[in-house]
Amino acid sequence: MIARLSGTIWAIGHDHVVVRVGGIGYLVRTPTSLLEQLDGPGKPVELFTHLHVRENALTLFGFLTAEELAIFQLLLGVSGVGPKVGLAVLSTISPQDLRQSVARQDEAILARVPGIGKKTAQAIIFQLREKISLPAEMRVPLLSDADAEVIGALCGLGFSLVEAQAALQSLPRGEDMPVEERVRQALAYFASAR
């Protein structure tokens, strides 16, 4: 596994940089935001890298900070998000903006990323909210298993994650109800809100 690459810039492409290390040129796919920060050919560069292995290709992805690499790797763990979409996220929004969109469950920020629709934005928010490190003032309380099942059922019925959260908040707290009853009451919330 190649975890870090340090050398000089040999060439810069529209979505990659070639890093010369000891006479060998490594083609490293990068976010476009990184390419804008590079000095140009002949200048030194150090990248945190992720080697993505597929049966027909080995692709190296590079980032200027360990934080960007960690977020990229978290994004790869989200169902429906591959390396291309992960790079698109980091090319379009900063790690801080991603954290804020996850904390606020703001699909609109993620939907600005090419290749991400509403469902993928919801999946990213839902799957990363427990994993991504958020500043203390942005942390959202953890969901119980029953709450997660209710949200999953409502999203499966076509409601957005934000709508599902609002319906969940309307349910009486402290009562031990089966998940099916909680989903029924959440649906009643939607019916009364119209």
Image: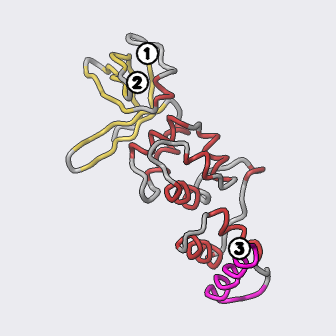
Amino acid type of disc 1? Pro
Span shown in magenta: 175-194
Quadrant of residue 52 in the image? top left
Which sits in the foreground, 96 or 181?
A: 181
User: Which residue sits at x=49%, y=27%?
Assistant: 34
Amino acid type of disc 3? Leu
Distance in Å between CA atoms under marks 2 and 1:
8 Å
Residue 6: which disc? 2
Tag 3 secondary structure: helix
User: Which residue sits at x=37%, y=27%?
Assistant: 16
Tag 1 secondary structure: strand
The quadrant the C terminus occupies is bottom right
Residue 49 is situated, as x and y percent measured from the top left of the image, at: 41, 36
Amino acid type of disc 2? Ser
User: Which residue sits at x=23%, y=43%?
Assistant: 57
Residue 64 is situated, as x and y percent measured from the top left of the image, at: 50, 29
Identify the residue position indicated by label 1 in the image.
Answer: 44
